[in-house]
Amino acid sequence: MRALATLIDRLIYTRSRNAKIDLIANYLRDTPDPDRGWALAALTGDLDFPTVKASAVRTAATERVDPVLFKLSRNFVGDTAETVALIWPDHMREDATEDIRLNTVVAELQEVTRKDAPRLLASMMDRMDANSRYALIKLATGGMRVGVSARLAKTCFAHAFGLDVNDVEEVWHALAPPYTELFAWGEGKSGRPDPSDIPFFRPFMLAHPLEETRIDLKDYAAEWKWDGIRIQIVGTGTDVRLYSRGGDDITGSFPEIAENFDQIGVVDGELLVRGDAQGGEAASFNALQQRLGRKKVSAKMREDYPAFVRLYDILFDGEEDIRAQPWSKRRIQLERFVPKLKTSHFDISALLEARDFGHLEEIRSGARDAAIEGVMLKRRDSPYIAGRKAGLWYKWKRDPLNADCVMMYAQRGSGKRSSFYSDYTFGCWTEDGELYPVGKAYSGFTDEELKWLDRFVRQNTINRFGPVREVEKTLVLEVAFDSVHESKRHKSGLAMRFPRISRIRKDKPAEEADHVTTLKNMIS
Amino acid sequence: MTNASTWIEPHPHGIYIKPADAWIDPSRPVERALVTHGHADHARGGHGQVWATPETLAIMGLRYGTADGAPVRYGDGVDLNGVQVSYHPAGHVLGSAQILLEYAGERVVVTGDYKRRHDPTCPAFEPLTCDIFITEATFGLPVFRHPPTAEEIGKLFTALEENPERCVLVGAYALGKAQRVIAELRQLGHNAPVYLHGALEKMCALYGQHGVELGDLRPVMDADKDEMRGQIVLAPPSALNDRWSRRLPDPITAMASGWMLVRQRARQRNVEIPLVISDHADWTELTDTITEVDPEETWVTHGREDALVHWCELNQRKARALEMVGREDEDDG
Ligand SMILES: [Zn+2]
Ligand SMILES: [Zn+2]
């Protein structure tokens, strides 16, 4: 438990993403199974002890500590977990040399009844120092909040054992904590786990912004970039799963898609809403976003905004993995695959016939459909490779003056909005993996979205500075702006003119937000 | 029953000793002031007459240019209109004293700020028997139990070992904490030069003049970047995230303060290494000291008075909170 406590403590005070990766990777290398697997699950929030609630911690504390002193302390410290960790009597200090194995802690927390939870926590805390008590409480009640996303955890694992993060990602989804098969593979003690039968996620192939690059259409195929939610559908014949870009299982949010997919294979496409002009108006995009994260979707929602998937690519045709095939071959297979699907819920993304690059530019600027975000350019011989590989796929946005940023801080608004956190500071990534603020916006969202954002801020606060709250860096905001300029005032070296929130991207993992350099290239 | 409230009056801006017509640590200019130590929330400029230890007078001289004052050595006393006033070590910073007042058969101790653990820069706190014990309560909550100092200093050594190409920048208050951190480093065998922000130089020199050996100290101003790699640099907390730090080789930021025990506070300071090193008594020291001194009454001045008074009541001790203003302005923790 002490090793995990030290790790958590250091993560709290570490700013750079690369330094965090090193810390976690070292921990994963040095810690035995299954402790390290439990730790990994705890860091990413994948460990849940349903019978251990925050109230159990409070109950345990009030049995040991005078209630007045506890309340005064809690008010001063501001966080119950930290208060309990610090205030807990250290009476066993002398013989507190024996460390409790994380595995023991997890096993006991999994088995405890709701009624016995306070007593169990108390007996564990009696044998721990303040740091370990803090880690224990955070572990037991969730909410570790040390800025480790699932993607970052996978990167750490890959880094620890010299593996490719995309290889790791692929098997990860088929495994459950404490991931012993994963570690055995990492250490070269066994082969890569084989997750056949289970419908698991394969990482997406992503595109680079085209910017100033010019390409030859002989080598690249062009198609529209549709403005919905990118998804992957995995059908095994007995089960169908839908995954978002970050690999989250979103099957429950779009049950009609899963119900209507009756083939074996893995396909990549865009979730859209049918309607006039493919229903591209903002309201329908919001309707899709609102369904994300819901366990149940009302019949009315399904009727008002009929969802369907426009397919871009095929990764598995039947049981056959065709990702190594060139795009042109996969496209032929996709054209054969799509007609087998129900037209009510699936179609294919058409290719654009352009004579040359100039012609393509004309087609792109002539697009009237609001569901078109721009043009995708795909190298005809490109295999389907996880992540963003230079030179293979490009995105060429119609309106380049927007960026995907990560929310960093929030502040209450004024007037009518004074009870809401409505002013947001957001940032983009540096090469070192640190987030640098690039702007601040307080408009562009609906009242409904404001309520959601406010709730996000309150539930994800990691720090308070007077009226400002620092939040967990997980939410991607698409920010539109009029122009970007150089600025000495900001650490990022740039400032946006008239930035506004154009979209909340619940579907996008924070790691995929834009880099500061991308914005620098937009400086006018 | 004590009689002291007839001759000692706590006011928001200081403690007034009626028969002596003098104030202890007044926060506004008065005719006659008894000063416990040099921190700005206890020592102000502009008084008529000042009684304090020679070290405290020197510190006040450096800070306010107040040259005049009557020095009283540890253990010595003066008679002010029949009130016997004597000064005794408080173990807080150089020159810090508890003030013992004896009048009409009663003994009253005003601790000023104090701590009980070892500090190489000043003599240790001396517990004095008394009827009324007027104690500080900066860290008067049971969450505050400061770890052993050597453990905290050890974090600096670890950081230097792990990052030989960088420097460790330690934020520490100019009076007391900065010199204590240096002295603790020296005690643990760190003989390398320590680099100083300009705002710390004079106070370190003053400590040296009063016999506190701080070893090889060099101004950051005169050092080049490469020379500071793998070394410790000290600056006042306000300089930590300031432009000034750009002249340093990729600094790792640390901060030495009792408040660093609380993660939220440490994160607000944006520090990477929180050093829980305090010049104040922690909860254990406060409650142990009250038990040891065993006064008839305990009066609690600045800090978390409510909790300490509540603790006294839980332990059948008579206690009251004094409403003092303007404390903890400078004070470090
Ligand atoms: Zn002080
Ligand atoms: Zn003070």
Image (cartoon, coloured by chain):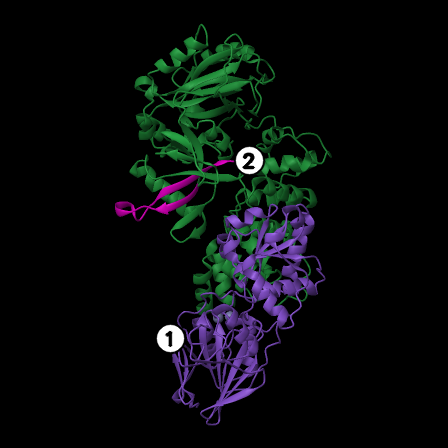
Chain colours: A green, B purple
Whole-Å distance between the Cαs marked 1 and 2?
Answer: 56 Å
Residue B263 is left or right of residue B151, and the answer is left
On-image quarter of the N terminus of chain B: bottom left
Q: Is residue B108 above or below residue A149?
A: below
Q: Are marks 1 and 2 in contact (CB under 8 Å)?
A: no
Residue under pointer 1? B12
Report the front residue among B209 and B302: B209
- Magenta portion: prevailing SS class: strand
For label 1, being within 8 Å of ligand 2 is answered: no
Q: Is residue A23 visible?
A: yes
Q: Residue sitting at 44 percent across and 27 percent down?
A: A522
Q: How far across and how far down the image is residue A158, in percent?
A: 64, 34
Q: How far across and how far down the image is residue A399, in percent?
A: 38, 23
Please name the amino acid that badge 1 sits on.
Answer: Pro
Q: Is residue A447 above or below residue A201?
A: below
Look at the image and give the residue range highlighted in magenta. Answer: A408-430
Give the structural element (helix, strand or loop) at label 2: helix
Q: Which mark is residue A151?
A: 2
Please identify the quarter of the rendering in which residue A389 is found: top right
Please identify the quarter of the rendering in which residue B91 is found: bottom right
Q: How far across and how far down the image is residue A475, in percent?
A: 44, 38
Q: Residue sitting at 71 percent across and 36 percent down?
A: A187
Report the front residue among A47 and B324: B324
Dot 1 alpha-carbon crowd within 10 angstroms: few under 14, some 14 to 19, many 20 or more = some
In the rendered image, the residue lying farthest to the top is A355
Please identify the quarter of the rendering in which residue A169 is found: top right
Q: Residue sitting at 43 percent across and 39 percent down?
A: A426
Chain containing the residue with disc 1: B
Chain containing the residue with disc 2: A
Give the structural element (helix, strand or loop) at label 1: loop
Please name the amino acid that badge 2 sits on.
Answer: Arg
